[in-house]
Amino acid sequence: MTNFDLIQLINEGVPSVHIECDHDTFLEIQKKLPQSNLITVAFDDGMYEFMKVGKLLNFYKDINNASVDVYDVMTCFDLHRYTQQKVSKLEAGVKRRLMIAQALFMNPKLILIEDPLANLDKESAKIIVGALETISETTRVITTSPSFRNVCLMPGNLYYSRNDTIMPIYESVQNIMPTIQTNNTLVVKSKGNEYVIDIQDIFYAESIDAVTHLYVKNSLIPTQFTLEELETQLQAYQFFRCHRSYLVSIPKVTEIQQWTRNSYVLVLSGQSDVEIPLSKRRYSEFKAVLHSGQ
């Protein structure tokens, strides 16, 4: 891996690393990591479906002579209400929480988890993010996901993988001057076409693979802009840089949710299935802007 040595980062004591990458890269990362005390939680891992949740966790604790307390782990992953349920009867989100929880009883020094938030309900996603933040205080955690947004929701250090290289997530710095029209419209050049977009129809902008996309009326449109250019041009229209990879329309925000002590997301009007990351260092500024009525 050029430009960024994952092993070195782990050896330096970084508690958690979250990487946007595909399944093949996940497998390559798994091979490169030191195998001693490494526990891998793959997306398609099987489980003992016939066992009840409480007995399953106690089983793993006993066979591994683990010092971790079952009650504490169940609290961390909000599993107490499922103690007497069979694994086969659990919803997908609860099963994913259990899958990660059982790995803690294998005495890991490092846990590698594939796509922990994939296709989950909001409650389970929030619980997993909080649990991983707690786990990373004592055990190093690496997660991977092909979803850029899911990676950005994670607490810790964020990276992306391209061409056998893992690098920190950052915005594009292309020097392309944007074209913006008056009358509250934005001219967007996308795939050889030009679109005139009403600015009030824009929910947020997202930087993906160094290309900035606009979310407009349930469509994600790639643009010729950088996120920095859009931030400058749209400030007068109540847009806020809530995260290094996101720009959000303030009037579209209906709720700020605190997932963990260091993790926040924004909920947008009419978009209950979309969570926009709000970075901790921008939280106070965002609240100040909201209260100022700008």
Image (spheres, helix red, strand yellow):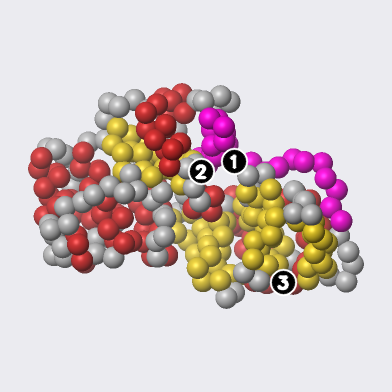
The secondary structure type at the circle numbered 1 is loop
Q: Where is residue 274 in the image (x, y as percent from the top left)?
A: 53, 65
Q: Position of residue 37 (x, y in %)?
A: 26, 30
At a point 47% along the width and 28% down the height, the residue shown is 6
In the picture, the quarter occupied by the C terminus is: bottom right
Q: Position of residue 169 (x, y in %)?
A: 59, 41
Mark 1: give few (<14), some (14-19) or many (20+) Cα within 10 Å. Answer: many
At a point 19% along the width and 62% down the height, the residue shown is 88
Residue that carries the numbered disc 1 in the rendered image: 169
Q: Which of the 4 image quarters holds residue 10?
A: top left
Q: Which circle marks residue 197 in the picture? A: none
For residue 251, above or below residue 69 = below
- Marked residue nearer the N-terminal end (2 or 1): 2
Three-letter amino acid code of the residue under disc 2? Glu
Residue that carries the numbered disc 2 in the rendered image: 20
Q: Do the residues labelled 2 and 1 touch (CB within 8 Å)?
A: yes
Q: Which of the 4 image quarters holds residue 127?
A: bottom left
* Mark 3 to mark 1 CA distance (whole Å): 27 Å
For residue 179, above or below residue 105 = below
- Marked residue nearer the N-terminal end (3 or 2): 2
Three-letter amino acid code of the residue under disc 3? Asp
Q: Which of the 4 image quarters holds residue 277?
A: bottom right
Q: Position of residue 253 (x, y in %)?
A: 61, 69
For residue 235, above or below residue 164 = below
Mark 2: give few (<14), some (14-19) or many (20+) Cα within 10 Å. Answer: many
Residue that carries the numbered disc 3 in the rendered image: 201
Q: Is residue 103 left or right of residue 18?
A: left
Region rendered in magenta: 155-179
